[in-house]
Image (cartoon, grey):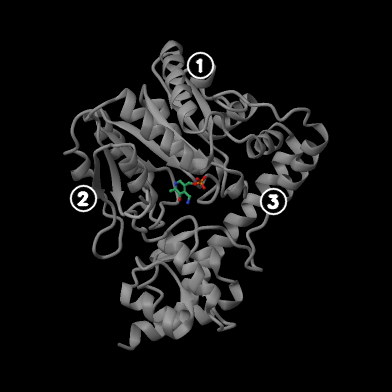
Amino acid sequence: MSHFASIAGVPGDPILGLMDAYRADPNPAKLDLGVGVYKDAQGLTPIPWAVKLAEQRLVEDETSKSYIGGHGDALFCSHLSQLVLGADNPLLHQQRAAASQTPGGTGALRLAAEFVAHCLPGRGIWLSDPTWPIHESIFAAAGLRVGHYPYVGADNRLDVEAMIAALQQIPLGDVVLLHACCHNPTGFDLAPRDWKRVLEVVKARELLPLIDFAYQGFGDGLEQDAWAVRLFAAELPELLITSSCSKNFGLYRERTGALLACAANSQKLADVRSQLAALARNLWSTPPAHGAAVVATILADAELRLRWSHELDTMRQRIASLRTGLVEALRPYDLAERFAHIGVQRGMFSYTGLSPQQVQRLRDEFSVYMVGSGRANIAGVDAERLDDLALAFAQLCTRR
Ligand code: PMP
């Protein structure tokens, strides 16, 4: 008997398939706007110098590879909590908020999903339509009922009215996932007045927000990007936040992130954290140490921290200038208005508004690779190639 004979294959991640197609394309002028990693002007995903320096110190200073505890590296958790919530946030002093280290933001989301499934049985989770596709599969994998609220209208603009109207219909007590900044895949972020309206609905429907914070520092700055998270933490007794160090520290493969929980009092926080540690025990036992040690080393050292924040500024400014540069490059074709949203969106991703057919043509005729939804990773362009990209867009928009 073959145990595996009846097992069928499943399709791979479409973005990985796109990467394969890009690699196989012999056109030297090809552009990869698909994969979701930051790229510098040379097309590389760099290791920040602050990370390199912290690693050198760790090689010298590390004394043991023994397990770290269920919540991970305590110094990392404490510094990351301060980075997310603000160093002087009263929740931290009152021991009403704390972080549990996880393997990346993905691990934090999975832990949050397990927490809801086990500790809040029957609660559904609501995701923006569209959202990062892995959100869909993570919460489904934990057995949660997954619902959606609209986010972007047919005109490829943020539709706050439709979002609010849908949130008002969510069953009392359900969980709502919100992107703190740099919404993946659209790049459209809520304005402060929109966040305040969402907060009112969250209060009225007694929803539990789960805020996914994967791009702190990639939108408007480390502090600015945390504004909504801190507003919700100040206004609500209970909150979950997933934080990722993949993008802002360039630590992608080191799987570094955390799940932050905010509770009504320190005893409740301890109860929640005991559950998180028990759930994590069954998922990955204890989290990987290296990336968290790097982050803790950087954040605990004034000089390294300053260097890192400058490097992060450079990444953010590059993305911002590529966004405005692309809109300007489209101006000679009278397309600057039509694509003005690219300058307004934040983070690496842009919902360009191109149709799946146009995306296919971009690939076939211009060797420009982006996701079928029309999502482009703006950081994937070299500034010198913006004119080429604008020309390709113009040809798609004028020719049928
Ligand atoms: N949330 C969102 C919205 C993301 O885009 C990503 C990364 N693509 C993550 C979470 C997870 O990041 P990681 O697991 O690599 O830290």
Distance (Cα) linking label 1 and label 3? 32 Å
Q: In this view, which residue lies farthest toward the right?
A: 60
Q: Which residue is mark 2?
A: 162
Q: In this view, which residue lies farthest toward the bottom?
A: 399
Query: Given this view, does label 2 or label 1 mark the residue nearer the observer?
Result: 1
Q: On screen, 210 above or below 128?
A: above
Q: On screen, 278 above or below 123?
A: above
Q: Amino acid at mark 1?
A: Gln
Nearer-N-terminus badge (1/3): 3
Q: Amino acid at mark 3?
A: Pro
Give the side of residue 102 with respect to residue 122, left or right: right
Q: Percent from the top left, x then y, of residue 353?
A: 34, 69
Where disc 2 sits, the SS reads helix
Q: Which residue is mark 3?
A: 48
Where disc 3 sits, the SS reads loop
Nearer-N-terminus badge (2/1): 1
Q: Percent from the top left, x then y, of residue 173?
A: 24, 28
Circle 1 residues within 10 Å: few <14, some 14–19, many ≥20: some
| Residue 38 seen in this snapshot | yes
Q: Residue drawn at (36%, 53%), measured in percent from left and top?
A: 133
Q: Amino acid at mark 2?
A: Ala
Distance (Cα) linking label 2 and label 1? 37 Å
| Residue 355 seen in this snapshot | no
Which of the pair 246/153 is nearer the observer? 246
Query: Given this view, does label 3 or label 2 mark the residue nearer the observer?
Result: 3
Q: Which residue is mark 1?
A: 95
Q: Residue drawn at (41%, 14%), measured in percent from left and top?
A: 268
Q: On screen, 377 above or below 144?
A: below
Distance (Cα) linking label 3 and label 2? 40 Å
